[in-house]
Amino acid sequence: MSWAAASGTAAVADQVPAAPGHGSPAPRPDPSAPEHGSPAPSAPEYGSVASERGAGAPEQVSAVPDRSTVRLALVVGGLVLAVLLGFGLGRLDGGGPSVAAGPDSALTGHSHAPGTGAHEHGVDQAAAAQAGGLSVSAAGYTLAPVAAAFTAGRPGELRFQVRDARRRPVTRFAVVHDKPMHLIVVRRDLTGYQHLHPTMAADGTWSVPLTLPQPGVWRAYADFTALADDGRQTAVTLGADLTAPGGYQPRLLPAAATSATVDGFTVSYQGTPQAGVTVPLTFRVGDPAGGRPALERYLGAYGHLVALREGDLGYLHVHPEPQPVDGAVTFWVTAPDPGRYRLYLDFQVAGVVRTAEFTLTVP
């Protein structure tokens, strides 16, 4: 994601100021300039008039070009040679524009089908390898809780705003995975996972009912794509801590495993994550009878995957394939560092959404 998970569809396409020639009238040609495709005025040929000595003076004819003509020819020739050399070096260097070095990726040449998500596999892989949600501010946006007091086990409400660099509440968001805002809540021992969808008031205040079932420190992640005044889209994940007072007994993270059971459904995955490399993880769901249930779209995709890093709870961006293949759903994961991660797979069968959880060790 950003959507961890699934590839949702941004309701508002990227809008950037048009460069000259993109949607704006092209500058009118100089009437005195030759038309495109017509021969340019020829330069004096050898043996033609080179200069005039004065009024009424006879024309002087020379078979040798003057110095200015020779100098111009040398300059033009040098420019042509430089262009040819640059083209040749570019071909040797890979045949394309240079890009900033990033982690290796199994996504080379791979992208989603058109319209399947705001986060394509063509994103900067260096950025994809950076965990998000580690602070309340990033990319010029800040998560500002308005009401965040909770009593363990009692229903409460979380209210917050997203503010821009000028401290103004942001009110324009792209719809990604069928929602303009995705809120992930989990306790700092990576238990109690919740995936919620707040609603926004006209003043930019988001609110959502929230119950923190156990005492402790919880982490809330706001995952969204903001629309700036100039139409630019910025995908951001911001994080803030929530507290439910009381005796906190953190639970040990379960051992790493490639299968999990939830409500009788067995979920397993295949794939070997590597630090700094984008690799596929393919998930399959089996029903209690041992068959393959028909996965249904949930929030515009056949599954959503959230990955959180043990320790600092860094939030990873996960990119999915738009369609299952032989009943399996594939997600592309970039783990930034070795360590343990907790995976949360949301999937829907027969109208019911369930979450399978896994512990993943990246060597």
Image: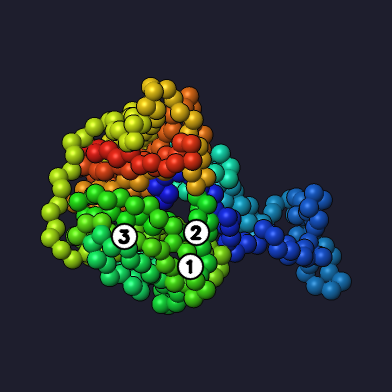
Q: Which residue does the numbered mark 1 point to in the structure image? A: 200
The amino acid beneath tag 3 is Thr
How far separated are the C-alphas under marks 3 and 2?
22 Å
* Side of 310 where 333 appears, left or right: right
* Side of 307 where 114 appears, left or right: right
Whichever of labels 3 and 2 marks the residue nearer the N terminus, that label is 2
User: Residue, x 70% and y 60% (percent of image)?
Assistant: 23
Q: Which residue does the numbered mark 2 point to in the structure image? A: 180
How far separated are the C-alphas under marks 3 and 1?
19 Å
- Residue 110 seen from this side: no
The residue closer to the viewer here, 275 or 85, is 275
Judged from the image, the secondary structure of the residue bearing numbered disc 1 is strand
Whichever of labels 1 and 2 marks the residue nearer the N terminus, that label is 2
The amino acid beneath tag 2 is Pro
The amino acid beneath tag 1 is Met
Where is residue 323 drawn, in percent x and y? 51, 34
Foreground tag (3 vs 1)? 3
User: Residue, x 49% and y 76% (percent of image)?
Assistant: 203
- Residue 210 seen from this side: yes
User: Residue, x 65% and y 62% (percent of image)?
Assistant: 20
Q: Which residue does the numbered mark 3 point to in the structure image? A: 211
